[in-house]
Image (cartoon, rainbow, N blue to C red):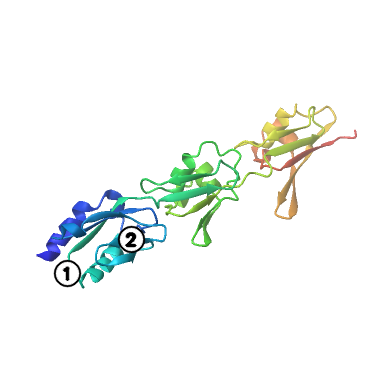
Amino acid sequence: MKNVLLALMCLLMLPVSALAADYVIGEGDVVGVSVWGEQDLTTHVKVRPDGKISLPGINDVQAAGLTPEQLRELLTGGLTTLLKDPIVSVSLIDSRNSNVFVVGGGVESRVFHMESRTTLLQLLASLGSLQAADLHASYVYRDGKKVMTGFHELFSKGQFEQDIQLEAGDTVYLPLKTEVNVFVVGAVNNPKAIFCREGLTLLDAILEAGSFSKYADENKTVVVRKEGDEKRFIDVKAKDLVNKGDLAQNLPLQAGDYIIVKESYF
């Protein structure tokens, strides 16, 4: 009978957030402790900065770092010196330990309080514009290691299968883009730096730079792209793109690319 009563008490007292069995109690959380038939031992108590709570008869008990079920077992053991077969339930009343930390300079730093289960994509969608953030170099840091690196495919390409569940204490690192432009130089009418927006292509950049000058050798266009410590030279036949509609030449651009249109000497 006692086991039935205990089960009913736990289900009735636990709010939705505490029904997640893996929730780990932290400093600042408020937990509800109920001892069947012992009104003096039934209370709401806040976890102190040292991670402990105090209850009549058993003094300080370590609560931070435990799940509600683990704390229930610990309190049950402690109360056996006072009561015979105590029936104890523990519920999470108020969570102050569900924070995720957003840093890196690509967006304004903030502390995000998870009021419910939250995925990385849901967090990113709540941050506003990510235009200045380098999604390729971003990562989630948890328990001393990176658990996910690179958010571009998830956020910009819709590869939602890469989404992960965030956990309390996670740090989401969103660095500032060190390079946000592409550069069009050489035989164009208006050489310039162009902001590398999502989906920018070679043809877009050349048109924004005033198109080819009368001295251009369009089929001798080169895109110089930095890949790590190396430079990659990509030859593009831009004349075939413009005159023949060869879309294979319409290279998608990346921030930091240099588009060099060479001159014709004849």
Q: Quadrant of residue 87?
A: bottom left
Badge 2: how crowded within 10 Å, few (<14), some, or many (20+)? Answer: many
The picture places residue 241, in percent across and down from the top left corner, at 70, 35
Front residue (pair 114, 238)? 114
Q: Amino acid at mark 1?
A: Leu
Residue 115 against residue 19 in the figure, above or below: above
Residue found at x 21% / y 52%: 13
Front residue (pair 85, 180)? 85
* Residue linked to disc 1: 83
Whichever of labels 2 and 1 marks the residue nearer the N terminus, that label is 2
Residue 214 against residue 85 in the figure, above or below: above
Front residue (pair 139, 157)? 139
Front residue (pair 109, 191)? 109
Q: Amino acid at mark 2?
A: Ile
* Residue linked to disc 2: 53
> In screen coordinates, is 247 left or right of 234?
left
**Residue 125: which numbered mark, if any?**
none
